[in-house]
Image (cartoon, helix red, strand yellow):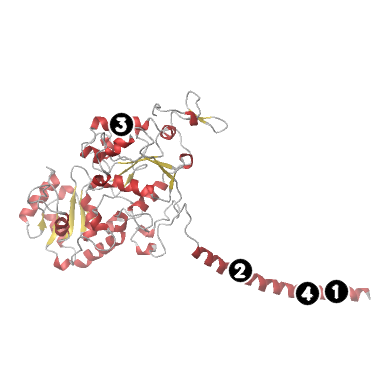
């Protein structure tokens, strides 16, 4: 009787476990399904996290942009921007205002927004409004030092000697600069002179992050101010009337309506490559347009006239001038002619994601002549259209637009800066103890360092 009772209980338990198992499986499936849909709804309704952003928005997938292997942002440094940048205020450091507005404070921001040096102002203004800006130095990954020295120098606001001494004075008042040896500090030098406009840069900024459109300068100077591993090549400052969203100052022409095969619009400046192009244009006036631009007088081209000339050729030639980079390379993407680089030492921005062999041509500057025109003439219009179309997809990287745009020069620069972020910084004048406190060689703790300080 006992055995029968146990058997009955065993059968009941077994059957009950089977029922419970099936019920649990059904409930678990329902729970997983509900959780999935709730998660989707929550993710779609929530705004982006304040401290991170994706490079490509939902409205512009990576397949829409012609990056190498559709690689940005997943190229070895994550798919989210997450960094904090402190921007020095012009009033917090003695001498900084002079580097921005000159000794008399008469150089205006508006005047410095114009021309090739406008990137100094634009990057500064974009960082001031950036979600990645922090007001706390102690939590910053990087520090931005705003200066408009190229513009100030051109406007007569400071002499070369004054620029040099003022920079040194400013740097000596930055404890965080001394602590890291400048490794986490960012400087913009937007012209062909690069960092050489600050004569003592090799001594004080040789570890800092330099943003510049200019690459190697050893062809003109003994020491290059550009270091591939720490510095960042930035796009030139194309006229806003050509890059703004919506109506453009000048619209591209169909290939069939362009008068010239190629053009070069620029000053000769006594440069061999440019002289060769002018002579070539004289021999082939129906193929190559190459008038020398004038800065003044009745022959001076206005902005609109300049871009109307530029758009009237299939290929826009970009020879080196005083330095290896040229703004004409970037301008060509907005009038939709194929840029032909005739500058052997040129460095180009965002090379980790842009395959320049697909959107431009680089020709040896030692072979400027009829052979170049013959080669360009041999390229079918269908292939020219394809190159232009690919360039159209990535030219957003040459526009200094806010970070709210999914693709811009500023967002590209932020990605490059993120690769330079370090967890720890030190210099020859920085020491630390067992409890993590940072001291100088006289055992003064970091928070007690007083300016002016000896620079590393």
State the residue position of label 3: 166
Q: Percent x, y for residue 12?
A: 82, 75
Q: How much space separates mark 4 and mark 3, taking CA atoms? A: 86 Å
- For label 1, the SS is helix
For image coordinates 21% across by 43% down, the residue present is 323
The residue lying furthest to the top in this view is 442
Q: How much space separates mark 2 and mark 1, taking CA atoms? A: 34 Å
State the residue position of label 1: 9
Q: Nearer the viewer, residue 430 or 86?
A: 86
Quarter location, residue 90? top left
The residue lying furthest to the right in this view is 1
How many numbered circles does the render carry?
Answer: 4
Q: Percent x, y for residue 72?
A: 39, 56
**Pointers 2 and 4 in contact (C-beta within 8 Å):** no
Q: How much space separates mark 1 and mark 4, taking CA atoms? A: 10 Å
65 above or below 103? Answer: below
Q: Residues within 10 Å of mark 3 (few under 14, many from 20)?
A: many
Quarter location, residue 190? top left
Q: Which mark is residue 16?
A: 4
Pointer 2 or 1: first along the chain: 1
Image quadrant where one finds the N terminus: bottom right
State the residue position of label 2: 32
Q: Nearer the viewer, residue 402 or 210?
A: 402
**In this view, the mark in front (4 or 3):** 3
Left or right position of 211 against 438: left
Q: How much space separates mark 2 and mark 3, taking CA atoms? A: 64 Å
Q: Nearer the viewer, residue 441 or 372?
A: 441
Q: Residues within 10 Å of mark 2 (few under 14, many from 20)?
A: few
Left or right position of 188 against 183: left
Q: Does residue 429 appear in this view?
A: yes
Q: Residues within 10 Å of mark 1 (few under 14, many from 20)?
A: few
């Amino acid at each position: 009787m006992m055995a029968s009772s146990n058997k009955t209980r065993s059968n009941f338990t077994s059957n009950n476990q089977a029922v419970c198992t099936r019920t649990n499986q059904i409930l678990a499936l329902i729970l997983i399904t509900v959780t999935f849909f709730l998660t989707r709804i929550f993710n779609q309704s929530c705004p982006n996290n304040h401290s991170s952003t994706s490079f490509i928005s939902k409205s512009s997938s990576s397949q829409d942009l012609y990056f190498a292997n559709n690689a940005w942002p997943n190229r070895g440094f994550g798919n989210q921007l997450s960094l904090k940048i402190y921007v020095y205020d012009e009033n917090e450091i003695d001498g900084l205002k002079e580097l921005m507005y000159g000794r008399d404070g008469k150089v205006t921001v508006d005047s410095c927004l114009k021309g090739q040096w406008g990137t100094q102002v634009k990057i500064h203004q974009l960082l001031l409004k950036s979600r990645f800006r922090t007001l706390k130095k102690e939590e910053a990954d990087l520090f931005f030092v705003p200066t408009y020295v190229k513009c100030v120098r051109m406007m007569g606001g400071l002499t070369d000697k004054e620029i040099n001494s003022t920079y040194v004075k400013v740097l000596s008042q930055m404890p965080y600069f001394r602590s890291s040896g400048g490794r986490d500090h960012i400087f913009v030098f937007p012209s062909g002179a690069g960092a050489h406009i600050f004569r003592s840069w090799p001594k004080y900024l040789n570890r800092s992050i330099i943003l510049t459109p200019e690459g190697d300068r050893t062809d003109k100077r003994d020491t290059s101010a550009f270091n591939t591993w720490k510095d960042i090549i930035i796009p030139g400052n194309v006229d806003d009337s050509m890059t703004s969203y919506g109506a453009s100052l000048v619209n591209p022409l169909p290939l069939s309506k362009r008068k010239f095969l190629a053009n070069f619009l620029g000053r000769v400046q006594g440069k061999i490559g440019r002289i060769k192009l002018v002579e070539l244009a004289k021999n082939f006036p129906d193929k190559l347009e190459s008038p020398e631009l004038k800065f003044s007088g009745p022959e001076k081209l206005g902005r609109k006239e300049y871009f109307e000339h530029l758009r009237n050729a299939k290929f826009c030639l970009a020879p080196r001038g005083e330095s290896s980079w040229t703004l004409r390379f970037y301008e060509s993407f907005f009038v939709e002619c194929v840029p032909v680089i005739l500058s052997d030492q040129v460095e180009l921005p965002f090379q980790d994601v842009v395959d320049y062999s697909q959107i431009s041509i680089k020709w040896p500057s030692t072979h400027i002549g009829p052979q170049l025109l013959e080669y360009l003439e041999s390229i079918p219009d269908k292939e020219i259209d394809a190159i232009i179309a690919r360039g159209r997809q990535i030219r957003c990287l040459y526009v200094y637009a806010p970070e709210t745009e999914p693709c811009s020069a500023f967002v590209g620069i932020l990605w490059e800066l993120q690769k330079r972020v370090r967890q720890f910084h030190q210099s020859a004048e920085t020491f630390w103890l067992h409890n993590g406190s940072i001291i100088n060689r006289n055992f003064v703790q970091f928070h007690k360092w007083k300016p002016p300080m000896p620079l590393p």
